[in-house]
Image (tube, helix red, strand yellow):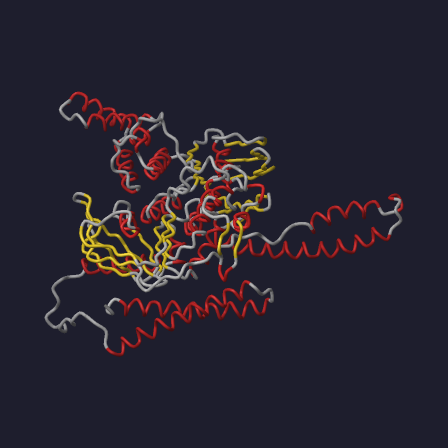
């Protein structure tokens, strides 16, 4: 028996039909994600299921007594309340007892009030729950719970809403972009919490690792239909490719059959009664099948990049603090051409401050940051399009330029550029306020790139963008001729586009790691395992043991040559991998597919082995 049944749901905004006659069910324990392009109605469908916004038609039924928790994309709270009140809003007597106890702790001299609060905690058995509250708040990085909610940042509000949902312990959880505004450690904690929990989950997220590790099913909104895939995101990609291939084949057959039937109809006498009525009726169905579009539009990011000179950005002995909080300390660093840097670290360790100093928006306390004369920044931040809701979509673009320059001297009008970014003509004169969250972010990305920057700074670029757009953006950034700095919580995105990391470890410590995020996490696991083994092993060595070997401090001449050669070999293998991946996507011959796949697997293995050896040598190459 289903825990949720949704039948024939339809929703329209003005002339735009978001979805029509959507039906699906969810059994207890299933964890389902909805995927679709921006503007397809994912958030609206979640809001309808959660009861936050009615569907125009259809029926939504939960099993009697089911407790539902809902995390919206943009949480709303009553103004003036504290974070504690925002998190603990509930009719649950346990949370009421905890709030009284927390308040009593603020006045420890009032022994009578404190005792009453402790008695209430005992009566409701709230002590274990209070410990869990501390754990959840700690994992989500919520420290100042006395802060007023109306002064909290968007990220703090999102984390407060997430904490409330987790602490309410609902049987059915609905989440819209739960990983937005969370740091990477917190995302991994949430991932483990959701994948191991005994509840039912319906969510929308762009985080592909999250989808892979949490979801049991994928619901895709495709060409106005709701298609279900039983499996995680990787399984969905495989089956979706098969489905697309089968659809293309059936559409091609329908087109061939339609041409035959059309010739037959034209040869028949004009009087309808002389023709085979059943054959004529069948022709309408064949025509509809042949008219299905199998080619999907995709965003095009082929914008011009200004030439970058030899001097880019240099940090010279840079120190920055806010009170006792150290952000950087005696930092020296010089950016190189085509460098692709990822920035990671817990919230509050100084990632945003570093970016502001790099952009020249914030001065260091000591030292200096030097920018090259040819550097042209493109800064994509979390604020997005500021004060643009009252503008038309076309006006946002023409305010920057009527004509946009592309590679090799090509030019596009603002209208043509919008179409490249998948804004159909009927959307050009819509108000920005009517766009979905993802469409606004896509429009913002267009305004950043059309200025032809050669140094891109992307702060949480994956928030609210659909997966198709992210894949195109990743491909563009991999071949981007300028410099790139990315601050992101999206592990998949980071793995695809960066070649090294700045890990902000706190207290001014910044670790430069030569690799992507997954490689960094694996390295951290190895370091943690080694530390645990070291602490568990006896410190005193037996007298008969051999003298301890001296720790290696530098590469030998042969290893130095090997290290330099590895860089060239890895680059060649990456190019080969890209060629094979492109060949794989452009052939339909089964034997050729198998041959290319085998060769691609061998290249990937070689690339991984050489990367591991490069990382090993890189530790001693400084």
> Residue 139 is drawn in which quadrant?
top left
Residue farthest to the left, as pictured: 543
Whether residue 32 can be seen here: no
Query: Looking at the image, which residue is at 23% across and 73% down?
Result: 555
Task: Give left or right: position of 608 versus 592.
Answer: left
How many callouts does the rendering have?
0
Q: Residue at x 34, y 28 (%)?
A: 89
Q: Between residues 315 and 497, which one lies in front from this camera angle?
A: 315
Query: Is 377 or 600 nearer to us in this picture?
Result: 377
Quadrant location of the C terminus in the rendered image? bottom left
- Residue 28 in the image, given as x and y percentages of width and height: 47, 39
Q: Outermost residue, bottom direction?
A: 558
Question: In terms of depth relative to the viewer, which is nearer, 133 or 405?
Answer: 405
**435 is higher (above) or lower (below) than 473:** above
Q: Is residue 223 above or below residue 576?
A: above
Q: Position of residue 242 (x, y in %)?
A: 58, 56
- Does 400 appear above or below 46? below
The residue that appears at 37% across and 35% down in the rendered structure is 165
Task: From the top left corner, tell me how far across and down residue 53 is, in percent.
Answer: 50, 30
Is residue 363 something that shows in the picture?
Answer: yes
Identified at 83% across, 53% down, the residue is 264
Residue 212: image location, x then y, percent: 44, 51
Residue 272 is left or right of residue 127, and the answer is right
Between residues 378 and 190, which one lies in front from this camera angle? 378
Q: Quadrant of residue 20?
A: top right
Q: Residue furthest top?
A: 112
* 41 horizontally vs 72: left or right: right
């Amino acid at each position: 028996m289903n825990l949720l049944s949704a039948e024939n749901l339809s929703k329209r905004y003005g002339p735009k039909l978001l979805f029509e006659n959507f039906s699906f069910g969810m059994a207890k324990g299933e964890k389902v994600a909805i995927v679709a392009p921006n503007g397809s109605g994912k958030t609206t469908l979640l809001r309808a299921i959660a009861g936050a916004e009615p569907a125009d038609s259809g029926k939504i039924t939960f099993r009697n007594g089911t407790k539902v928790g809902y995390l919206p994309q943009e949480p709303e709270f009553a103004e003036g309340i504290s974070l504690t009140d925002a998190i603990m809003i509930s009719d649950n007597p346990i949370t009421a007892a905890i709030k009284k106890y927390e308040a009593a702790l603020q006045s420890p001299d009032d022994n009578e009030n404190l005792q009453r609060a402790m008695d209430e905690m005992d009566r409701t058995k709230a002590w274990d729950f209070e410990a869990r509250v501390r754990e959840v708040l700690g994992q989500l990085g919520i420290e100042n719970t006395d802060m007023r909610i109306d002064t909290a940042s968007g990220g703090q509000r999102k984390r407060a809403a997430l904490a409330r949902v987790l602490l309410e312990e609902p049987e059915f959880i609905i989440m819209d972009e739960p990983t937005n505004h969370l740091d990477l450690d917190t995302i991994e904690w949430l991932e483990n919490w959701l994948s191991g929990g005994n509840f039912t989950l319906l969510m929308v997220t762009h985080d592909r690792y999250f989808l892979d590790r949490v979801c049991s099913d994928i619901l895709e909104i495709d060409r106005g239909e709701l298609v279900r895939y039983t499996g995680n995101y990787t399984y969905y990609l495989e089956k979706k490719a098969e489905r697309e291939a089968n659809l293309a084949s059936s559409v091609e057959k329908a087109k061939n059959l339609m041409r035959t039937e059309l010739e037959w109809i034209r040869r028949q006498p004009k009087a309808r009664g002389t023709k085979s009525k059943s054959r004529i009726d069948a022709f309408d169905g064949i025509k509809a099948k042949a008219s299905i579009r199998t080619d999907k539009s995709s965003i095009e990011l082929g914008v011009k990049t200004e030439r970058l000179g030899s001097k880019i950005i240099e940090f010279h002995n840079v120190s920055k603090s806010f009170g006792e909080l150290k952000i950087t300390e005696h930092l020296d660093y010089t950016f190189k051409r085509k460098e692709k840097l990822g920035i990671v670290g817990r919230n509050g360790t100084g990632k945003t401050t570093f970016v502001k100093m790099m952009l020249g928006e914030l001065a260091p306390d000591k030292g200096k940051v030097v920018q090259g004369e040819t550097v042209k920044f493109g800064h994509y931040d979390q604020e997005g399009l500021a004060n643009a809701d009252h503008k038309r979509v076309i006006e946002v673009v023409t305010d920057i330029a009527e004509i946009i320059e592309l590679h090799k001297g090509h030019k596009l009008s603002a209208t043509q550029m919008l179409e490249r970014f998948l804004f159909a003509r009927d959307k050009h004169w819509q108000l920005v306020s009517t766009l979905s969250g993802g469409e606004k972010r896509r429009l913002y990305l267009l305004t950043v790139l059309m200025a032809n920057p050669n140094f891109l700074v992307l702060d949480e670029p994956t928030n609210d963008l659909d997966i198709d757009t992210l894949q195109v953006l990743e491909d563009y950034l991999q071949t981007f001729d300028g410099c790139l700095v990315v601050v992101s919580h999206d592990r998949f995105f980071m793995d695809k586009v960066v070649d090294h990391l700045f890990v902000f470890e706190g207290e001014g410590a910044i670790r430069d790691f030569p690799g992507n995020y997954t490689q960094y996490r694996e390295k951290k696991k190895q370091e943690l395992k080694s530390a645990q083994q070291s602490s568990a092993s006896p410190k005193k060595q037996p007298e008969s043991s051999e003298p301890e070997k001296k720790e290696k401090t530098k590469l030998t001449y042969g290893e130095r040559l090997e290290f330099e050669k590895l860089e060239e070999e890895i680059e060649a293998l990456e190019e080969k991998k890209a060629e094979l991946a492109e060949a794989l996507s452009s052939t339909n011959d089964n034997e050729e597919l198998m041959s290319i796949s085998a060769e691609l697997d061998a290249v990937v293995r070689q690339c991984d082995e050489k990367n591991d050896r490069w990382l090993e040598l890189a530790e001693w190459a400084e």
